[in-house]
Every structure is written in structure tokens, then in C-alpha cells.
Amino acid sequence: MKKIIVLILLFYSIACFAQTKMFYADGSEDVKKISLTFDDGPGKATKQILEILEEKNVKATFFMLGARVVDDPETAKAVVAAGHEIGNHTYEHINFYAYKDEDKAEKIEKELLQCEEVIKSTLGIQSFLARFPYGYMKSDAIEATKKHNYYLINWSFGTDWQDMSAEEMHVKYKQTIKNGAIFLMHDLSKNKKVLSFLGTFIDEIKEKGYEIVTVSELLNLT
């Protein structure tokens, strides 16, 4: 009888693990919380973003590229020192939607682990959030992140790479404020349009009664 009970509990545990959600593009619709995320850094706009976030008393999640952490470790460390969350954005920003070589699955895993090692050795952090460049989310990416105990995080809205004015961009971000929103932005030098309205956008989010939190808090992953 005891063996049967043990087997039942074992199968139940395996089933629960298999059902664990590993991919997210937004948070709960029932809670007035949203997250700001910044990709591709550390970059030339990172310090300005940090200044705005500090002024507004907001914590964000930065999905960093391993190669850029290697190039600018001090800025990466400044993000951590300011209390922001770090995510894995792979090492070299390869577009895996366009990658056709036969070693694709191995390359995906290598990119993830290279970035992980840089984040650990440079920042002393073991991140458990991953986001692939261009929002790549096919089965091979999901398998790699699951294998290495990552949650794969995309976004509910982002448009700061599009060809439009800062005013148009601001309106689009503002129109998509909702419960559980995960906003995508970038912290590169070309991101001046976002910098022009980021502070105001944060004020608008708060005025609507939303709390701005890190991705792990939004998704209750901590």
C-alpha cells in the first residue's frame, strides 16, 4: 500500500512539473501591475534610463546581452546596484527566426549559457528569466530555457524600434496600458525617442492606479 501511495505522489509531482508554465507574454489580468523591460544593453542609453527610473522610484527588468556586458561591465553593475532585475538576452543577439544552420538547437543553448556565464561571473547573479532576440519562442527555445531552469519572457507591447515620431510612439505605449502588461523598450543610443517620454509614461501609468514592478514580481516567480 505504501508503495502505491509513493508511486501516486511521484506521478502527481511529475505531472505538476510538466504543467508548470514556462512561457509568459503578460501577467495577470486581475491585478493592476505592469512591468517595464529594457533589451539589448547595457548600452549608451542605460545610464539615462537608470536616472529616470531612480527619479520615479521604479524598478525594471533589463534583459542583457552577454557580449555587451563584457564590453561595458561597469554599466551592467550599475543596473544591479540600483536594484533592478537582470534577464538573459543571449550572448550575441542572433535572429533565430532567420537562422537556418543545422546546429540551431545547439546554438540556441550555447547562446543562452554563454550569456548566463557572463552574468554570473561579472554580476554575481544567477538569472532565471530569458528573452530571445526578436521574441523568438519556438519549441527549441522553450526546450532550452526549460532545460536550464529559465522562464521564457516576451512582452504584451513594444514598438520603440519602429519608424515613427516620439509623440506617435508615446501614444501607442499609453494606449496599451492594461493589467499585467509587459512593456518592451531598448536601452541603445538610438532609443532617444523613448527617453523623451519615459518619465511622463511612468507618471501616466501611476496616475491610472498601476504599480510598476519587476517581471518576476508581476508573474509571482520569486
Image (tube, grey):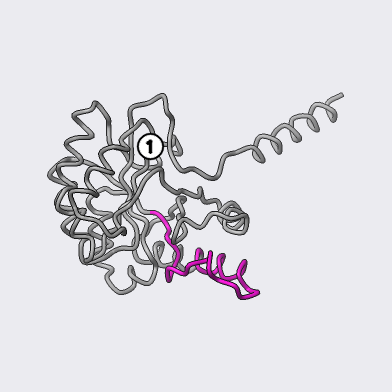
Q: Position of residue 159 (x, y in %)?
A: 32, 52
Which residue sits at x=62%, y=59%?
140
Quadrant (top left/top right/bottom left/bottom right) for the C terminus? top left
Quadrant (top left/top right/bottom left/bottom right) for the N terminus? top right
Taking the image as shown, residue 118 lies to the left or right of residue 46, namely right
Which is more toward the observer, 34 or 150? 34
Which is more toward the observer, 73 or 60? 60
Which residue sits at x=30%, y=45%?
36
Residue range of the region highlighted in magenta in the rendering: 87-112
Taking the image as shown, residue 153 lies to the left or right of residue 165, namely right
Which residue reaches farthest left?
55
Q: Amino acid at mark 1?
A: Glu
Which is more toward the observer, 29 or 8? 29
Which residue sits at x=24%, y=49%?
169
Q: Position of residue 143 (x, y in %)?
A: 62, 55
Which is more toward the observer, 184 or 86? 184
Residue indicated by mark 1:
217
Q: Is residue 201 above or below residue 158?
A: above
Q: Is residue 92 above or below residue 40?
A: below
User: Which image quarter: residue 79?
Assistant: bottom left
Mark 1 secondary-structure assignment = helix
Q: Position of residue 37 (x, y in %)?
A: 33, 49
Q: Residues within 10 Å of mark 1 (few under 14, many from 20)?
A: some
